[in-house]
Image: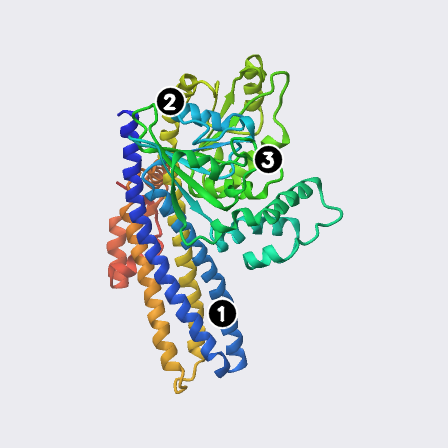
């Protein structure tokens, strides 16, 4: 099976898992309906019962509210996982600090230029994520813009929250009209630099606000317009601010490799120390859009080590989706340079050793001159060959986690409803509310019981994998039974039956004499 066939098989399995996930989410949706009815009912009758029963209802309300919040979180997780499974391609994301060769690596891989993938040379640093997919024909691009709501929640909120600036603005008008809250006098250097980034968003709002207020969220653009929307500087080196209003850019272009039509790469903004929005973008992308991570690193030609910022970047990537261990879906690519910026080839092997001895665990450490299409293609071939083998296993991990989450929620819901039965024992049958309570309670309990049984049946049908540990335990139990478990002899059983009047009574008594039991 060649690489294209392997990728195709993984995508087909993902579609099957997405269908299974739809069934799980339907179960959770029905659970939410039942819990909402239960919560509404207890709120309605709480003022009509005695204080002791009211206290029970209050406890039920707290448990129901907590479970509803967990149900909503589970549905968000289901939606995120479903989107991952329904993507028609596998995505490899390039991650790194500014100036490490990340965009150059993608240029060499795709054959695109600074026009489509701006590199750090000359200040054309990436300001927004760019998703690049292979396709035949000319290069095509589109821009997805923020609207007012997403700009405030995704761009501004991280700054206000981490810098302790109080309540975020509730509109663009409020952001434009009011001065920024003052930063604490004892703020750290990180916070001071982050505040400077926020101030740039504030000062330059008039230069990109028209995009945020545009009625069109998806805008087709020509290839020569990509730089305008993704780079922090224009071709003349002057600062550009259109990127501040952009959520992401999607580009389709021919790739040199002909068997990668179902694989995409994503160019993420170079992560620095203080741009909180870039960190937020990285977390979002690694959580929802990236399957395999490439950490691009250019070791210093004189001397280098694993620094705090390397660990911080790795930790950001690791925390984005804890369910999928980053060490099982990431690679390091060491950028070898031999031009005017210095020759670091001699130090690459040493740095690779430092990496392997550090706590930054990845699948493999590769090296390539990111400016060489030939070297990048060879390195990428090796990475893809290893990556497609781990993606399927990671998908198994995700769908198993979703099953576990749903099973746990249903079990807790059944326990909650069982505890709620105590209220029915305190109810006065003639009360005007009781019949309605009993009707809704029985309906809710029935929904939960049926949903749990359906899930158990579904999981039983899907249990096709062997369980060697269970088989070994069963064999051991049978072996022990052959030598240690004892039972009455046939004659003793007959005698006891005559005395006790039935076989059931005879076998329920301890035998006076014990003989080895012949099992199997």
Asked whether the residues under the numbered discs 3 and 2 touch, taking CB atoms below 8 Å apart as contact, a structural biologist would say: no
Horizontal side of residue 218 vs 176, given as left or right: left
Q: Residue furthest bottom?
A: 430
Quadrant in which residue 175 is drawn: bottom right
**In this orientation, does residue 383 appear?**
no
Regarding mark 1 in the picture, which secondary structure is present there? Answer: helix
Identify the residue shown where x is 49% and y is 39%: 128
Horizontal side of residue 357 vs 375, given as left or right: right
Quadrant in which residue 437 is drawn: bottom left
Q: Which residue is mark 3?
A: 272
Residue 311 vs 498, above or below: the answer is above
Q: Which residue is mark 2?
A: 381
Label 3 vs label 1: CA separation? Answer: 46 Å
Residue 61: give its label: 1
In this rendered view, identify the residue nearer to me: 344 or 247.
Answer: 247
**Nearest to N terminus: mark 3 or mark 1:** 1
Identify the residue shown where x is 56% and y is 24%: 355
Quarter of the figure that contains the N terminus: top left
**Nearest to N terminus: mark 3 or mark 2:** 3
Horizontal side of residue 128 vs 391, given as left or right: right
Percent x, y for residue 311? 59, 32
């Amino acid at each position: 099976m060649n690489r294209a066939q392997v990728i195709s098989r993984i995508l087909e399995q993902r579609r099957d898992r997405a269908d299974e996930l739809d069934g799980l989410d339907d179960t959770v949706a029905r659970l939410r309906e039942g819990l909402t009815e239960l919560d509404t009912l207890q709120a309605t009758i709480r003022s009509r019962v005695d204080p002791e029963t009211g206290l029970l209802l209050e406890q039920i309300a707290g448990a129901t509210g907590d479970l509803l919040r967990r149900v909503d979180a589970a549905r968000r997780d289901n939606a995120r996982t479903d989107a991952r499974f329904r993507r028609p391609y596998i995505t490899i994301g390039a991650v790194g600090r500014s100036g490490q060769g990340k965009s150059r690596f993608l240029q060499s891989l795709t054959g695109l230029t600074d026009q489509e993938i701006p590199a750090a040379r000359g200040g054309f640093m990436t300001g927004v994520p760019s998703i690049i997919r292979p396709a035949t024909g000319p290069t095509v691009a589109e821009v997805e813009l923020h609207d007012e709501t997403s700009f405030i929640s995704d761009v501004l909120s991280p700054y206000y929250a981490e810098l302790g600036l109080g309540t975020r603005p509730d509109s663009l008008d409020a952001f434009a009209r009011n001065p920024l809250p003052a930063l604490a006098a004892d703020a750290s250097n990180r916070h001071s630099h982050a505040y400077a980034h926020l101030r740039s968003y504030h000062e330059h709002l008039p230069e990109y606000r028209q995009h945020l207020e545009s009625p069109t969220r998806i805008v087709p653009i020509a290839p020569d317009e990509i730089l305008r929307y993704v780079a922090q500087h224009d071709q003349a080196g002057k600062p550009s601010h259109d990127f501040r209003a952009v959520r992401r850019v999607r580009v389709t272009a021919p790739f040199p490799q002909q068997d990668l039509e179902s694989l995409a790469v994503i160019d993420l903004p170079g992560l620095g120390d203080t741009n909180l929005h870039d960190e937020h973008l990285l977390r979002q992308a690694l959580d929802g859009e990236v399957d395999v991570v490439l950490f691009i690193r250019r070791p210093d030609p004189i001397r280098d080590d694993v620094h705090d910022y390397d660990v911080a970047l790795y930790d950001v990537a690791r925390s984005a989706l804890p369910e999928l261990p980053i060490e099982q879906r990431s690679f390091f690519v060491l950028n070898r340079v031999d031009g005017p910026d210095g020759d670091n080839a001699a130090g690459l092997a040493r740095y690779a050793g430092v990496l392997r001895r550090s706590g930054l665990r990845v699948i493999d450490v590769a090296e390539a001159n990111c400016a060489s299409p030939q070297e990048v293609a060879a390195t990428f071939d090796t990475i893809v060959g290893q990556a497609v083998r781990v993606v399927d296993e990671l998908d198994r991990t995700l769908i198993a986690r979703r099953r576990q989450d749903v099973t746990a929620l249903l079990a807790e819901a059944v326990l909650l409803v069982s505890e709620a039965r105590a209220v029915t024992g305190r109810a006065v049958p003639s009360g005007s509310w009781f019949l309605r309570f009993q009707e809704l309670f029985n309906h809710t309990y029935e929904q939960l019981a049926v949903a749990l049984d359906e899930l158990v049946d579904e999981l039983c049908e899907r249990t096709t994998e062997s369980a060697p540990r269970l088989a070994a335990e069963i064999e051991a139990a049978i072996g022990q039974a052959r030598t240690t478990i004892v039972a009455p002899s046939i004659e003793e059983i007959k005698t006891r039956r005559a005395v006790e009047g039935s076989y059931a009574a005879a076998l329920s008594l301890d035998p006076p004499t014990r003989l080895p039991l012949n099992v199997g």
